[in-house]
Amino acid sequence: MAVNHLCQWQYLRFQLSHPSAPACRYLSPSRSKSSTSSTAKVNCSAAPSSSPMDSHNEGRKKFMEFPYASGPVRQLMVDLVSTVENTLDSQLLPCTLPPDVQYYENQNGTAQASLQIRSGLKSSLIDFILGSWVHSELPTGAALNITSLSAYLNSSTDAPNLLIELIQSSPSSLVLILDLSPRKDLVLHPDYLQTFYESTRLDEYRQMLEKVPEVRPYFSSSLYLRCVISPSAIMVRVDTETETGAGESTRLDYIITNHVHPVAKQVIGIWLNQCACGGRHVGESDKAYLEKRDGLIKNKTIEIDLGSSFPRLFGPQVASRVLGEIQKVFTA
């Protein structure tokens, strides 16, 4: 959450001011371009057939509806969240956030949001999995919709974290951020670069997307964000022609379904296999370094972004309540 919420609230602020090795295995589809749209299959020997949240957590139900997202974005997020949860379910605790933090809105009803956080068992490599969506009506009359999923590993491993975020403020444009965020210096540790970025050929997925004519690189104005992402991070903006016609599928819908969705599914699979389920452990000295580094990133998110954007969007009372619960997770 730390990195992708830094980006999403920075984007929102801009809009408002300018009218043990885990017993899991993810089986990914073929890497070939002709089969990137194949449905991935999950095998998790210890996972139960359904999560306790499915029947007991109304907040999760609201989250999984993604009510303000377009059809293709909703399908993408439901697929990705389900894939991660199904693979890691036996290692995750149910979401315990208060109901008024799992879903909240501002006093005027112009902004709504949903938040789900599932912490990992102490015996797993998972720190927490966080998903959220935010809907905000903008002063211009348009609406901003942000959907995100992030997964943080604990200090038992130095494997990268996962983040994906989709930011949409019109039916014809989309910003996509997708990355396995490094947790070690890639210059000092070239083997880390080789293991997680070169051997996995992650950069090929960015290249695949950038071959689509409407896709171009997206550069965040936050220098901090740019320094915590990986060299293979996918940060792109998709701009298509404005299209009208109720019920008609747009060019952007096509790009999300046929290009963004398959790429995101492949990257999620790499993270599950190589990072969450890779069984990579570190010694005590590395644990101390990781705890410090991870803590700094989380604190920076609260300090420089959420702390100012949340109150402006949801009011001080709601912001204080939500940020307090997020802070508990960050410091647990």
Image (spheres, grey):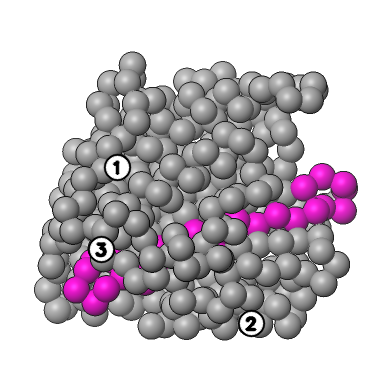
**Residue at disc 3, secondary structure:** helix
Please say whether residue 175 is one of the residues in the magenta stretch: no
Upstream in the sequence, badge 3 or badge 2? 3
Q: Is residue 79 above or below residue 315?
A: above
Please tell me which residue is depicted at 29% across the width and 42% down the height of the picture.
Answer: 269
| Along the line of sight, the residue nearer the viewer: 80 or 196 | 80
Residue at the disc numbered 2? 321
- Report the predominant secondary structure element of the magenta stretch: strand
Using a 10 Å C-alpha cutoff, classify the residue at mark 3 as few (fewer than 14 neighbours), some (14 to 19) or many (20 or more): many
Total marks shown come to 3
| Crowd rating for badge 2 (residues with CA inside 10 Å; few <14, some 14–19, many 20+) | some
Q: Is residue 91 above or below residue 43?
A: below
Of mark 2 and mark 1, the one earlier in the sequence is 1
Q: Quadrant of residue 287?
A: bottom left
How far across and down, in percent of the image, does residue 52 sit?
38, 66
Q: Which residues are magenta?
A: 115-143
Nearest-to-viewer mark from 3 and 1? 3
**Is-magenta flag for residue 124?**
yes
